[in-house]
Image (spheres, coloured by chain):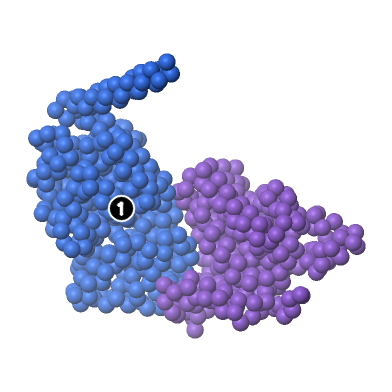
């Protein structure tokens, strides 16, 4: 009797399992969201997810992708690469998603790549700007890996040219985050371009994530008379560096990259310190393109604040992937990958982009100037 | 020369913080021979309590400093009562491991309640936001505040230890706990009091760092805690003036390495000092050679 009962139970379990599978396949598309919702890079993750959720809501309200509703499955990787890998595996094997969006930072995103390639699930990021994210060290492209942001060598290059031409700087000091590939990659490319255009690097100092005291480095730099200070790093430390630099009377322009784009930067540095600060970014809310204006309007209505670059990138990312899913022949990872590869002139709020043979986008870059902590000027530079 | 003086100001400000934390390490070690690894986290809690007072209760800096020191003192006593007192007769390694456990508990417990993201102290106003210029030297009012408060607290501590009955009891317990008990000194009360003093100082350091650097997070205590430990060992662990000297020394070394050497090697140099001290003179700068009794 007991045996019969357990047999029956197993039968019931199996049938319900199949039932669950088949129901999720008919009119829904599951997309994984693996982002830094807490931890040191939380601002990037949360910002991206706000944009993604807005885009998904819009797409679903308009009838979904070819009539199928997008179901987002959202997890928090706590800004750690190991957690990002665990969650990617979970999304692929347990939730059976069609594609994964995120994570936002290079370190976390790269740790997800093996999972994507092994399981043939496309992954795409809006903001992992590391140089060799989409291709392996030997130059071969990671088949299932895509991104819609420019990469660090381009960012470093543009900032070096901007410093040399627009700010007519001759001597630059660098304070880089030596604990991240992001900081090191940016610094390397800035130095290369800046020295090629005839400039001098008078100091190259380093810090590690979590440092709070930069007075010693800054006092040293003060004695060296640099025209600009380049800080390739994230907002947590950059905010403190800018505050301490201005306190020590270093009033030259301070340059940075997209890691500066966070409201926390203003909290840490204080608005009065954020004058003559320039950083390369994906998007500026000062843009007057009608599509951007429309995005800013709907975003403000939904969240009650102006969108920043990560909001915009998240929004574009979700639409970029949804666009490919709509064009895919079948709803399989492989077909979506092919569709993503074939993307051309996709119009996003961060610019029009096409996917090149290395799975990188071809798109423009913006240099934003801050005045009293607010975005004041923006210069668009094409590749 | 000018640059050197500026670096000196930077180093003394940083060193003051290390010295305040190192005092707590050294006093606790002096009394119960325990390296209290949770001490750096009491400092972190001090920063959060200060943050809470300033932003949520809209208190000024000095009331917040007092509250922060008081709450940290209570916390120190509680930690001692709950975690270390039951282990009074256990082996030293058991207590040490408990200390690491308490440290992790405080870090991740705080992270659970306040979220792991860094928070920034509100912008300073009035006197606190001023920068003074002496020739070409710049000194901010926060640096002056840190230096003055540290000196005042150190003098107060010296007075408590040297001039009061409880201070006498502390010195007696640190010399020989059993003998002190035979003389009618309550060892438990003395130990509690030591934790109270040390934690109050750490709380003060926490809020000072909050206004100085403007950024606090639940793991902020780890690195300064370790460096203050190096400072305490450098000065001779268990010796109060040693911790003060050690704190300033480590602060200055860090700043000078960044300022005149390579900022990449800053932390490496500090920990290399720890290794060298442990090899060359384990009893520290002010420590006396003691023979291990067999």
Drawn side of residue B279 relative to residue A362, left or right = right
| Observer-nearest of B26 and B245 | B26
Image coords of residue A185 (percent x, y): 27, 65
| Observer-nearest of B38 and A368 | B38
Quick check: can you spot residue A178? Answer: yes
**Above or below: residue A357 compared with residue B224:** above
At label 1, counting other C-alpha atoms closer than 10 Å, the crowd grade (few under 14, some 14-19, many 20 or more) is many
Image coords of residue B46 (percent x, y): 61, 53
Image coords of residue B11 (percent x, y): 54, 73
According to the colouring, which chain is blue? A
User: Residue A315's image quarter?
Assistant: top left
Quick check: can you spot residue A168? Answer: no
Quarter holding the N terminus of chain A? top left
User: Residue B178's image quarter?
Assistant: bottom right
Residue in the picture at 74% in, 52% down: B85
User: Residue A138's image quarter?
Assistant: bottom left
Residue in the picture at 39% in, 60% down: A238
Determine the chain carrying the residue at label 1. A
- Numbered disc 1: secondary structure: helix
* Residue annotated with mark 1: A111
Image coords of residue A298 (percent x, y): 26, 33
**Above or below: residue A236 compared with residue A22:** below
Q: How many marks?
A: 1
Report which colour depicts chain B: purple
Residue in the picture at 27% in, 77% down: A200
Drawn side of residue B148 relative to residue A198, left or right = right
């Amino acid at each position: 009797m007991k045996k019969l009962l357990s047999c029956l139970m197993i039968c019931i379990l199996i049938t319900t399992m199949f039932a669950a599978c088949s129901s999720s396949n008919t009119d829904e598309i599951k997309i994984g969201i693996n982002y830094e919702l807490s931890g040191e890079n939380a601002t990037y993750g949360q910002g991206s997810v706000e944009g993604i959720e807005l885009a998904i809501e819009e797409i679903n309200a308009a009838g979904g992708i070819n009539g199928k509703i997008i179901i987002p499955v959202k997890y928090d990787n706590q800004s750690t690469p190991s957690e990002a890998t665990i969650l990617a595996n979970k999304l692929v094997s347990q939730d059976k998603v069609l594609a994964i969006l995120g994570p936002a930072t290079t370190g976390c995103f790269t740790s997800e790549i093996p999972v994507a390639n092994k399981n043939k699930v496309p992954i795409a990021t809006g903001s992992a700007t590391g140089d060799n994210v989409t291709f392996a060290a030997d130059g071969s492209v990671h088949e299932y890996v895509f991104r819609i942001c420019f990469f660090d060598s381009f960012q470093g290059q543009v900032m070096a040219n901007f410093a040399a031409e627009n700010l007519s700087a001759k001597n630059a000091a660098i304070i880089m985050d030596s604990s991240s590939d992001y900081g090191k990659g940016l610094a390397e490319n800035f130095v290369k371009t800046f020295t090629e255009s005839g400039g001098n690097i008078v100091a190259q100092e380093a810090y590690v994530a979590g440092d709070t005291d930069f007075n010693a480095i800054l006092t040293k730099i003060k004695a060296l008379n640099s025209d600009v200070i380049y800080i390739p790093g994230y907002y947590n430390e950059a905010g403190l560096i800018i505050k301490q630099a201005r306190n020590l009377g270093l009033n030259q322009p301070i340059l940075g990259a997209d890691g500066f784009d966070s409201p926390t930067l203003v909290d840490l540095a204080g608005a009065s310190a954020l004058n003559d600060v320039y950083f390369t970014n994906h998007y500026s809310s000062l843009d007057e393109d009608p599509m951007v204006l429309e995005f800013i309007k709907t975003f403000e209505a939904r969240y009650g604040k102006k969108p920043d670059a990560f909001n915009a990138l998240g929004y574009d990312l979700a639409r970029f992937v949804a666009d490919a899913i709509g064009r895919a022949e079948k709803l399989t990872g492989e077909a979506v990958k092919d569709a993503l590869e074939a993307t051309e002139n996709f119009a996003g709020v961060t610019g029009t982009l096409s996917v090149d043979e290395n799975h990188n986008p071809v798109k423009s870059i913006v240099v934003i100037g801050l005045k009293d902590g607010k975005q004041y000027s923006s210069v668009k530079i094409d590749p | 020369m000018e640059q050197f003086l500026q670096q000196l100001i930077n180093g003394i400000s940083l060193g003051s913080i290390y010295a305040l934390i190192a005092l707590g390490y050294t006093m606790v070690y002096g009394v119960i021979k325990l390296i209290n690894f949770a001490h750096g986290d009491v400092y972190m809690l001090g920063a959060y309590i200060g943050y809470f007072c300033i932003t949520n209760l809209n208190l000024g800096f000095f009331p917040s400093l007092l509250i922060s020191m008081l709450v940290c003192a209570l916390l120190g006593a509680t930690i001692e009562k709950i975690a270390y007192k039951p282990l009074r007769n256990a082996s030293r390694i058991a207590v040490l491991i408990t200390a690491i456990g308490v440290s992790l508990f405080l870090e991740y417990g705080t992270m659970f309640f306040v979220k792991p993201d860094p928070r920034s102290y509100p912008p300073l106003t009035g006197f606190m936001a001023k920068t003074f210029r002496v020739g070409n030297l710049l000194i901010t009012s926060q640096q002056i505040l840190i230096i003055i408060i540290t000196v005042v607290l150190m003098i107060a501590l010296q007075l408590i230890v040297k001039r009061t009955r409880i201070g006498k009891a502390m010195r007696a317990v640190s010399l020989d706990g059993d003998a002190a008990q035979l003389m009618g000194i309550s060892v438990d009360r003395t130990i509690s009091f030591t934790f109270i003093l040390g934690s109050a100082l750490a709380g003060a350091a926490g809020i000072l760092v909050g206004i100085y650097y403007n950024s606090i997070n639940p793991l902020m205590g780890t690195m300064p805690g370790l460096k203050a430990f190096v400072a305490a060992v450098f000065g001779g662990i268990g010796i109060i003036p040693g911790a003060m000297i050690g704190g300033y020394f480590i602060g200055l070394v860090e700043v000078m390495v960044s300022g005149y050497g390579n900022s990449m090697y800053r932390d490496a140099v500090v920990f290399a000092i720890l290794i060298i001290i442990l090899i060359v003179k384990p009893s520290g700068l002010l420590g006396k050679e003691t023979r291990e009794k067999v």
